[in-house]
Amino acid sequence: MLPSSIQISGEPLSGAEVRDICRGLRDNAVRLLSLRGCRLCDRDFGRICRALAGATSLAQLNLNLGVVSSPSRIKQLAEALRTNRSIQSLFLHGSPLTDAGLALLNPALALHPALVALDLGDCMLGDEAINLICGLLPPDGAKSGLKELTLSANPGITPKGWSRLAIAVAHSSQVRVLNLDYNPLGDHVAGMLAVAVASSRTLEVLDLEGTGLTNQSAQTLLDMVENYPTALRSLVLAENSISPELQQQICDLLSEGEEEEEVAGGAGDTQEWEKGREPAAHQRGSSSWMCPSDPSSQMVLMTSGLGDSLLAETEM
């Protein structure tokens, strides 16, 4: 039997559902587990963590929107991750981790042999967390690290923290997708990121939506795209004070570069990197956030493959 996916959104979990989830994990019958916004007691959360610790089929774990809601749950998740060897994508968007919580998780994240995608958006992180995250982006020649990193909506990170991240990205031999949307970056940080992009040989997607940029940033990014060969294919600049003309110029240049790669036979299919990410309207604290209440929010069991390009790529 092919591994299935279990997806429940915004629902209280019953004891029977928790037992079914644990059984599926222990039987290695679950490839994707998504419990975004679900409500469950600490005892049941611990049961799920103990089950996922030994799961060998689980590739994607989505605990977005407050499931990991306390220091005790952070510790339980960290303990599970220290034992688990299969999880490739971990989504914790909208969890009140803070720097202290990430410090508890970090040893397990750093030593995990399969983890390549991490979403820490809207997790109340600051500069101390950035210091830890940089360790998950090892420089060229070091061990493998994250390919996709999401740090959306963490306004506690200062320009000093972003500068450290920019240096780590510039020297990383792995990272391909970096989502920094809805952080108050401003033009100064954007300039540092432009240098990082120009230096990186792997970064393909950079999301700077709603980050307080102006035409000054856009001109710097345009000069970078126009004059330096990079791996960048997608640069998101929506919801900034940037003229449509400059945005279009950047988009056209990136499109030209991608077309040239395809003609040369050096580009594969465009990767789909958005699985599991939370839309901007779902960020914690947003007045427009709401948990789904339609039938699709109930438990879903699917025996077909995930179709997630990141998972497929890792297995190739």
Image (tube, rainbow, N blue to C red):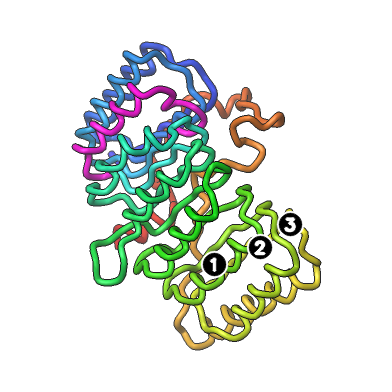
Q: Is residue 72 magenta?
A: yes
Residue 274 rendering spot, x and y as whole percentages: 53, 51
Name the residue that disc number 1 marks. Answer: 192
Q: Dot 1: few (<14), some (14–19), or many (≥20) neighbours within 10 Å?
A: some
Viewer-proximal residue among 257 and 316: 257
Among numbered discs 1 and 2, the one appearing first in the sequence:
2
Three-letter code, disc 3: Asn
Disc 1 to disc 2, how far (Cα)? 9 Å
As drawn, the residue found furthest toward the front would be 160
* Residue extent of the magenta highlight: 62-86
Task: Say which amino acid is labelled 1.
Answer: Met
Q: Locate residue 165: give its quadrant.
A: bottom left
Q: Which mark is residue 179?
A: none
Quadrant of the snapshot with the N terminus: top left
Asked which secondary structure carries label 2, the reply is helix
Residue at the disc numbered 3 = 240
Going by the numbered disc 2, the residue's amino acid type is Asp
Give neighbour class at mark 3: few <14, some 14-19, many 20+ (Cα, 10 Å). Answer: some
Q: Residue at x 59, y 58 (%)?
A: 207
Confirm whether the magenta stretch covers residue 115.
no
Report whether residue 300 is seen.
no
| Depth order, front residue of 255/192 | 192
Q: Earlier in the sequence, mark 2 or mark 3?
A: 2
User: Where is residue 143, by image quadrant?
Assistant: bottom left
Question: Looking at the picture, how far across and down is residue 52, in whole percent?
Answer: 27, 31
Give the residue number, with chain letter if any, for mark 2. 187
Element type at mark 1 = helix
